[in-house]
């Protein structure tokens, strides 16, 4: 009864794993392309970058003239003469900053550097998305192998149970022997259930990382080339990693903000003007054009405080740059070490599998002539099963370590990997907006009003 129930459970579990509709084989490259196309995390970061592009447009707009239109109309009652009169006016105002100590120019440069920082953040996100896809792909392959190995182990245990029962029926073994192999069968059944549950977890993780559920996964392609030494890998990382480039730009932004704080203490000159059209012909239309100046004399210490704050943040940015360099180098060292460990482990596990298989064959031969028990065979099967499991884990770790090293060097991008996918072009949106927005709907309305007034 135990054998029958165990076989039914195994078939049920296998059905869950393999009963889904047939899906075409998927490669690691397919998974990376799908992740690049479908990642909501990447789409979110791209939208954030487009929003940052608008900071440049806003900064550029600050050095252009601004026009506004206002108007009023109403009724005035004179209590002294008991008379009513109506009024209406329309005023167009102009304001143009002529000189502000360089604050506007510095603001534009800060905004442009902010866009460059956001682009580096996008590359960082792209690397994480692709690394997650690699990890999910290799986890799925590993866990699929785990399930298959555990099912094979269950099948072997079921055969041993049946064989031991047959021998018990003819009096060759004791009831204790039957109980021992039945216990091993129950253990094998629980491992199959565990592996199936783990595979389902990995399947959902794959869906999140890649954007679709996995079909039949092909063996991974050859590993991408790597630098010959860890020192070369570290040098590439310190040059190429987006976190390093981002930290360097943040230092430049902090220095510019110090200069902006200094510019805020300088005088500013602006051109101001307005034209007022009066419906009441008694007052008549008026126009004013003037150059105005502003000199900050005392602001309660706010300007000095802003300057000191900018200096402190500039120091922080330099410390952050040093810290980022240390972390990037540390990540390269860690990934390199993990790769070295994984490759050494693969070599050792391959030898372990070969030795365990030789030992199992010998024990089976001995068991066939009565020199070994069924429990001895199951023990040898368990050793081989564990060795094969360890080898699958080591191969998975090697691939993840290689792509982790690429990420640590800043090279885990769709372009560097040569993925045949339409690459996102951040310049496309930037070219549309960096010169400041075109006329808005209100601007177009104002243009029509001024055209009519001129007529």
Image (cartoon, rainbow, N blue to C red):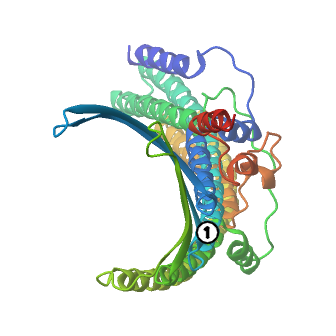
Is 24 located above or below residue 388 in the figure?
Answer: above
- Residue identifier under label 1: 246
- Name the one closer to the observer, 435 or 97: 97
Q: Where is residue 244 drawn, in percent x and y? A: 63, 72
Left/right of residue 5 with respect to residue 332 in the rendered view = left
Residue lying at 75% horizontally and 27% vertically, measured from the top left: 25
Q: Where is residue 27 drawn, in percent x and y? A: 75, 36
Q: Is residue 282 visible?
A: yes
Quadrant that contains the N terminus = top left
Q: Secondary structure at mark 1?
A: helix
- Name the one closer to the observer, 79 or 331: 79
- Name the one closer to the observer, 175 or 56: 56
Q: Is residue 369 visible?
A: no
Q: Where is residue 193 drawn, in percent x and y? A: 44, 29
Residue 242 location, quadrant: bottom right
Is 351 located above or below residue 8 in the figure?
Answer: below
């Amino acid at each position: 009864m135990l054998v029958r129930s165990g076989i039914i459970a195994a078939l049920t579990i296998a059905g869950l794993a393999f009963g889904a509709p047939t899906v075409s084989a998927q490669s690691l490259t397919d998974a990376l392309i799908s992740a690049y196309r479908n990642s909501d995390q990447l789409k979110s970061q791209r939208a954030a970058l487009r929003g940052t592009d608008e900071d440049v447009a806003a900064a550029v707009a600050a050095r252009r003239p601004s026009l506004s239109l206002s108007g009023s109309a109403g009724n005035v009652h004179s209590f002294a003469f008991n008379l009513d009169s109506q009024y209406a006016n329309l005023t167009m105002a102009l304001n143009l900053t002529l000189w502000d100590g360089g604050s506007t120019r510095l603001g534009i440069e800060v905004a442009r550097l902010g866009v460059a920082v956001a682009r580096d953040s996008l590359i960082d996100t792209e690397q994480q998305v692709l690394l997650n896809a690699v990890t999910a792909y290799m986890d799925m392959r590993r866990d699929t192998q785990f399930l298959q190995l555990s099912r094979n182990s269950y099948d072997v245990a079921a055969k041993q149970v049946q064989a031991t029962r047959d021998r018990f029926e003819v009096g060759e073994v004791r009831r204790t022997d039957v109980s021992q192999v039945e216990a091993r069968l129950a253990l094998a059944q629980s491992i199959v259930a565990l592996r199936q549950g783990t595979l389902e977890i990995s399947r959902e993780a794959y869906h999140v990382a890649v954007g679709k559920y996995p079909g039949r996964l092909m063996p991974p392609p050859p590993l991408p080339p790597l630098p010959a030494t860890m020192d070369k890998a570290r040098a590439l990382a310190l040059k190429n990693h987006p976190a390093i480039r981002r930290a360097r730009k943040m230092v430049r932004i902090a220095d510019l903000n110090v200069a902006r704080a200094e510019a805020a203490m300088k005088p500013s000159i602006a051109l101001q003007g307005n034209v007022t059209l009066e419906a009441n012909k008694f007052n008549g239309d008026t126009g004013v054009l003037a150059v105005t100046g502003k000199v900050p004399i005392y602001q309660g210490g706010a300007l000095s405080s802003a300057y000191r704050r900018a200096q402190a943040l500039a120091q922080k940015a330099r410390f952050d740059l040093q810290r980022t360099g240390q972390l990037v180098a540390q990540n390269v060292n860690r990934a390199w070490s993990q790769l070295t460990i994984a490759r050494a482990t693969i070599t050792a596990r391959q030898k372990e599998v070969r030795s365990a298989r030789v030992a199992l064959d010998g024990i089976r031969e001995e068991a066939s002539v009565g020199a070994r028990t069924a429990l001895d065979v199951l023990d040898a099967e368990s050793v081989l099963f564990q060795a094969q499991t360890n080898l699958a884990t080591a191969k998975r770790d090697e691939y993840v370590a290689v792509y982790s090293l690429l990420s640590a060097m800043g090279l885990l991008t769709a372009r560097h990997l040569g993925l045949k996918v339409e690459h996102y072009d951040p310049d496309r949106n930037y070219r549309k907006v960096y010169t400041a927005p075109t006329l808005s709907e209100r601007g177009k309305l104002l243009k029509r009003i001024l055209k009519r007034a001129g007529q």
